[in-house]
Image (spheres, rainbow, N blue to C red):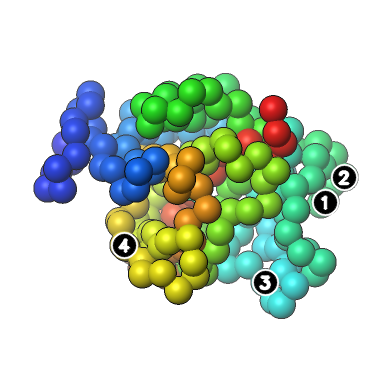
Amino acid sequence: MQQLNLLGGIRTQGSSSEQIGPQAFIFRGFLLDDAAQFLADLNGVLQVSPWRRMPTVRGWMSVDQSNCGPYGWISDKTGYRYSSTDPLSGQPWPDMPELWQQRAFEAVDAAGFKCFEPQACLLNRYRPKSKMGLHQDRDEEDLAAPIVSVSLGLPAVFLFGGLRRTDPVEKYLLEHGDVLVWGGVDRMRFHGVMPVRQENHELLGEQRLNLTFRRVQRR
Ligand code: MD6
Ligand code: FE
């Protein structure tokens, strides 16, 4: 699928990239050819650690979540943290599929970061009306490593702010197959996702999936 590229990004291999910060990039259509395999791999992951809605200090997350890799991000009444086991089963999280690691590495490389060995992949499932409030990703010990974010299924408007909660936010549409990479000076920027519109995606129906790959511990 060809992408219109009205914002002056550069074209790479039938997709295009858009720079949204000094060290933040959207690679449009980066995963279009791999989407079917990603979804097959995802089914395997979910058989071990199924979708669940996590409680927070003040209520509930608005998205269904799971994880794969050595660590998983969890929330409960006491706060957020990374855990090497799935609290539902007490067992380790499922392995991170090889293809996912490979593509995450390629995206980080394309964004100009040196190396990337993700230790956690957080899976988010948005139903229509699900959203993600403005937040910083600050539960990782290694804030030097970038984060890779994969979007599949329904589109969503991504809010990209500054280092303070009150800084102005820019809006970017993230669509099926897009990959977002950020790190460095952009690593601590506030960000969120507007409520997903009720629509039907040809592969995924009424859902948006977001996979984020993170380095948890310092190297
Ligand atoms: C989402 N993403 O796109 C939510 N965090 O559904 C995130 O919260 C996020 O996309 C850190 C880095 C990239 C992200
Ligand atoms: Fe985040």
Check whether the beta carbons of the residues at disc 2 and disc 1 lie within 8 A of each other: yes
Residue at 73 percent across and 68 percent down: it is 55
* Screen quadrant of the N terminus: top left
* Badge 4 or badge 1: first in the primary sequence: 1
Q: Residue at x 58, y 68 (%)?
A: 62
Mark 3 and mark 2 lie on one chain; the one further toward the N terminus is 3
Report the residue at 81% width, 52% height from top: 88
Q: Earlier in the sequence, mark 3 or mark 1?
A: 3
Position of residue 77 in the picture relative to residue 66 (left or right): right
- Between marks 4 and 2 in the image, the one whose residue lies nearer the viewer: 4
Q: Residue at x 19, y 33 (%)?
A: 10
Q: CA distance from mark 3 to mark 1?
A: 16 Å
Instruction: Report which residue position mark 4 lands on.
Output: 171
Which mark identifies residue 87? 1
- Identify residue type, mark 2: Gly
Q: Between tags 4 and 1, which lies in front? A: 4
**Helix or strand or loop: what does disc 3 sit on?**
loop
Amino acid type assigned to the residue bearing label 4 in the image: Lys
Q: CA distance from mark 4 to mark 3?
A: 25 Å
In the rendered structure, find residue 139 and report the number of the disc placed on it.
none
Residue, disc 3: 60
Q: Is residue 129 left or right of residue 201?
A: right
How far across and how far down the image is residue 116, in percent?
55, 27
Examine the image and state in which quarter residue 61 appears. Answer: bottom right
Nearest the viewer among 142 and 30 is 142
State yes or no: Cβ of the residue under disc 1 lies below 8 Å from any atom of ligand 2.
no
The residue wearing badge 2 is: 90
Q: Residues within 10 Å of mark 3 (few under 14, many from 20)?
A: few
Give the alpha-carbon distance from disc 4 to disc 1, as whole Å: 35 Å
